[in-house]
Amino acid sequence: MSSELESIVDKVLNYISKKNVDYSDLRMEKTVYSSIIYTNGRIERIQHGATKGIGVRLLANGAFSFVTINQLDLNKIYNTIDDGVSAAKLLGERRKEKIRLMDVKSVRDEVKYRVLDNPVNIDLNEKKKVVEKLYKIASNIDKRIVNITIFLMDSVREKILANTDGTLIKFYIPRVRIGLNTVAMFKGKIGSYMRYEGFVSGYESIYKMDFDEYSRKIVSKALKMLEAEPAPSGRFTVITDPDLTGVFSHEAVGHACEGDLVVSGESILAGKLGKRVGSELVNIYDDSTYPNGWGSLKYDDEGVLTQKRLLIEKGILRKYITNRETAVKLDMEPNGGARAQDYSHPPIVRMSNTYMAPGDWSFEEMIEDIKYGVYLLGSRGGQVDTAKGTFQFNAQEAFLIENGEITKPLLDVSLSGLTLETLMNIDALSKEFTLRTGTCGKGGQGVPAGTGGPHARIRNAIVGGRR
Amino acid sequence: MMFNILDKVLKIGLKMGVDQIEVYGALSRRKYVELEKSEVKIASISSRSGIGVRVFKNKSIGFSFTEDFSEKSLENVVRRAIAAASIRNREEFLKGFTEPAKIPSVKDTYFKDTEELSLEDITDNALHMRDIALDKDKRVKAISGGISVSFSERYLKNSLGVELYSKGTWASASLFVVAEEIGTTSSGFDFQSERNHILLKYDEIALNAVDHAVKQLNPKKIMGGDMDVVIAPLALSSILATTFGRAVCADNVQEKRSFLAGLKNKKIANEILTIVDDPLMPGGIATRSFDGEGVPSRTLNLIENGILKSYLYDNYRAQREGIESTGHASRGYSSEPYISTSNLIINVKDQDTFENIISDIGNGVYIRWVIGAHTANMITGEFSVALGEAYHIKNGEIAYSLKEAMLGGNVKELLNKIIVMDRDIKKIGSFISGSIKFSKLKIST
């Protein structure tokens, strides 16, 4: 297969070299995937197939165009590229400032992940057995569970990234992901809980999972929510669990550090490099090199070697996430932040694995002096307005903290605030640390992203309950 | 050409011994010009095509898709669909795919001039929006957004005799504006989606975006509590789409993942509320004459005078209950059909002007858009969102924008607290509604 992709890449690069363009990069991909949604004892949805296609970015006359097609007929690709060249030139005539890219060394490399139980070689029946096994365990725990939905997804992507500077990198990226959603219903009350686990590997990671422990944990959380009461609303001292500390770091800080938003004036963190933006305790990283991280990758989609970026060090803003274009405008080095969802989208500045470094408190110490507060756990997602610096994220689980103890469960609730105020109000971080898998959406593109951190104590945060 | 491919696949399937087969072909092209700061950032041109194949064999359905139309690949895609069917359990109630039926006609879904709109025109219109926004107010610091124009064709054929074709165009423009004054930064945006690009009001979008950004400079804090709240269609659409819009789908109801399960024919909302799903609305963003399975589109009352009248069905979910599909299967070529709303129309019997609605409120909040609506819970109906753009209503007037605030509640409760709707009906994509006043919602600050 790979040789078919390579031969097309060769010919297309050759075709582009005859066009009068300043620079071009292309990504050619083939992704084989399958996805099973298994609900209440039956396969609800099953999708499997392969997609392939090419996306070409062209810089001409100081402006970018991007063209993509999923029919791999060479003449069709050439026509598409002609349209792209005209488009870039047309935009170039209308730009005041020409786009420049920071020079980087060209790279020839191959990035291949170890995969034992390759999803491509595992037939659907085998995959069905995995979900059936998990279903059998989860459905036998408690009668109040009325819905069990299991998600099992895998993909194997072969990708060639090449550019007119001589870079050519081949990638082979396997991913597997499993999720369990449970709904509990009792005496008119509803509780639900869901959790995903994802791995950059083959099925070996899923085979290794302890389904018993995994389902017990999720089911017990859904059941706990049956006793939940509406959450209070207003300003409280809040503890976020590692999942939510990660989502906060991602939404509130990570997005605002994205070079494109900084350059365009849409980030609250623009112009604040070297300045205090958070309390002494706050260290936030975006780390594309985190071993086996869900958002890790050796090179970004511009062929730039990625790195571990220290965004905030002891409360001081140190770095933005950049691509080759924003590196020029920000006078920084390109640090490997260009990512695209797949071949059919142009690379834009993205995060990878974003996390807050742990502190040295124990959880008990963190809550012992809280008279009345809220403990939030498990993410249902979040959103940010980077220009205003307002963020929101939603917890799957919440508890009241009264006189230093965790007491009543609360119905799902969100936390919101102003990024800069909230970072200043973090006054304790626990020792433990976990990194979780997720998908981050920006500009209509979803990419795998890791988020993580310790438990964090935030003073004076707004909780949006309905009591 | 696409119908030829569909024919070939039908033949291959029947030869391989399936009981029924259905092939869906789709082709789409899109042009998109994006703005950043005060320049055109990038122009994208994309095209995509493929076919999705479903087979019905031994009372179960299997699906696969391909983007490669070679003979070998067409055979393989049928084989993969059969393999998928074979691991599903038999379901005796299943009758298979759609029987041929009369398809209604729909208006204003395809415009040749929109399909053929040049990249140059798209670019110049985008730059025009930029110029209008930058000239309007000196406090405008940055803009982003763009214009997208797309065209798509759908082909559907099954072995029961259904053979359908449709094509459509879509054009949308959006502008996001950042405004700055010493010590305060704010943002505002506006957008419009249409089937015909001629209807896009570029000047209005740009002026609105600036207006919304500037109005939010120097926000203030207020005391939280239970208060009357007016929610604009933009915010309503995002709150209702992830909650009511999904909870009303029969798959979620049957699988008990919906707070609307078991509530059919029960009163779930204030009796002045009627919600209609209308795939036949002329020029609607989600307007279509047939759904993804070839079922004719029809208008459906979901909530009628506060009573939940119907859920949304595709063939599978309808056959499971022994009823007819309502024609709400959506799909792309690479996925099995899934149930979704089409054009969702919110109707409230009691209507008034926006000014009168506001002037009736002594202490309240007007919410234009919210942050985090996608985190709302369709299973329980609970939501807790941050207010992205909101204003304090004081003594019958919109006073100033709010600094930080949240809105929490449950959608069932929300639907019961409706008091009156603004007569000025807005189209937010496929969501059609006026601003609605709700009594006593919880605002946290």
Image (cartoon, helix red, strand yellow):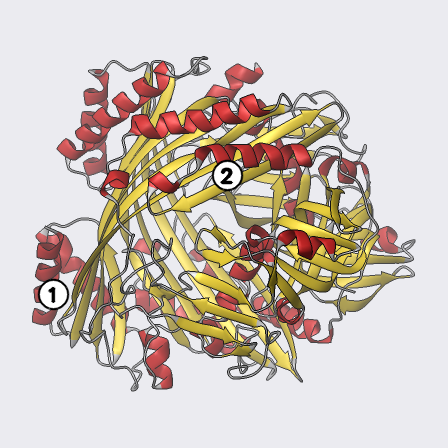
Vertical relation: A437 (above or below) A332: below
According to the picture, the residue beneath numbered tag 1 turns out to be B10
According to the picture, the residue beneath numbered tag 2 turns out to be A296
Q: Secondary structure at mark 1?
A: helix
Tell if the residue under mark 2 belongs to the same chain as the one under mark 1.
no
Q: Nearer the viewer, residue A69 or A174?
A: A69
Q: Amino acid at mark 1?
A: Leu
Q: Is residue B293 left or right of residue B74?
A: right
Chain of the residue under label 2: A
Q: Amino acid at mark 2?
A: Ser
Q: Nearer the viewer, residue B352 or A180?
A: B352
Rounded to the nearest whole Å, what is the CA distance between mark 2 and mark 1? 43 Å
Which residue is depicted at the point 65% across and 82% down? A188
x, y percent for residue A464: 74, 56
Which residue is depicted at the point 36% across and 82% down? B320
Which residue is depicted at the point 88% across and 58% down? A372
Which residue is depicted at the point 62% across and 69% down? B415
Q: Secondary structure at mark 2?
A: loop
Vertical relation: B74 (above or below) A274: below
